[in-house]
Amino acid sequence: MDNQPFTFDIALPGGIPSTYSNHITRRLSSMRGQYADEQTYVALLAGGDALLYEVYEEQVPENAGELLHGISIVHPGKVGDEYFMTKGHFHAEIATAEVYYCLAGQGVMVMETPEGVWAVEELRAGKVLYVPPRWAHRSVNTGSEADLVTFFVYPAHAGHDYGSIEKQGFRKLIVEQGGRPAIVDNLRWLPPEQR
Ligand code: PAN
Ligand code: ZN
């Protein structure tokens, strides 16, 4: 059967969509090695496997020409000074872009290219972010109480390369300093020629 056009509503601000076909949850245990403060990570995990973020997506065939889309919800919280965040990834088909539209909350998108060029852009309700081809991306909730809720859409054949980021993380970390988010260096990160 041919794919049929379809429409759906997203309740603002940040209502949980009930019609998405796939619901992915990521807990603290899936972020091992990603937070700079390993000791605090281990201590927190011993107290329970907190839910860090969730993704609701509409499953479509993973073909070029299809668009995969959904809602990402990063819950508020920190591991030490570092805010709750997504794993982050390059697209496996690296030359594919993505659009994010922020529906609710406060946060940033941390991005970098394979060469180590980095960027951090603010996410707040109403903000549209275009992540160009070749840029890895991770969303970070810098709010103290509210969820960071974004709508995303990207080519359905893009796939995800998590491994490259898992090795040493992103070049920049987002931490709370003096009650506010700050961008700091990730001391584990090495430029491509030193890896
Ligand atoms: C998003 C992300 C979502 C969760 O759909 O997959 O925000 O982040 P991680 O995939 O890094 O765990 C996206 O960028 N898709 O390509
Ligand atoms: Zn992506």
Image (cartoon, helix red, strand yellow):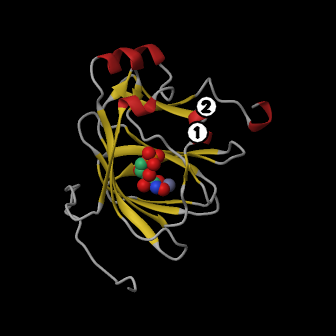
Badge 1 crowding class, 10 Å Cα cut-off, few under 14, some 14 to 19, many 20 or more, is: some
Circle 1 residue: 165
Q: Given the image, on which type of amino acid does mark 1 rest?
A: Ile
Side of 188 relative to 54 (left or right):
right
Residue at image point 27% right, 23% down: 48
Q: Secondary structure at mark 1?
A: helix
Side of 186 relative to 87 (left or right):
right
Side of 124 relative to 63 (left or right):
left
Nearest the camera: 17 or 13?
17
CB of mark 2 near ligand 1 (< 8 Å): no
Tell me whether the residue at label 2 lies in contact with that at label 1, contact meaning CB atoms closer than 8 angstroms: yes
Nearest the camera: 145 or 48?
48
* Residue 135, placed above or below residue 173: below
Q: Given the image, on which type of amino acid does mark 2 rest?
A: Gln
Residue at image point 40% right, 17% down: 42
Coordinates of residue 169 in the picture (x, y in percent): 57, 34
CB of mark 1 near ligand 1 (< 8 Å): yes
Badge 2 crowding class, 10 Å Cα cut-off, few under 14, some 14 to 19, many 20 or more, is: some
Q: Quadrant of the N terminus?
A: bottom left
- Residue 117 falls in image quadrant: top right
Circle 2 residue: 168
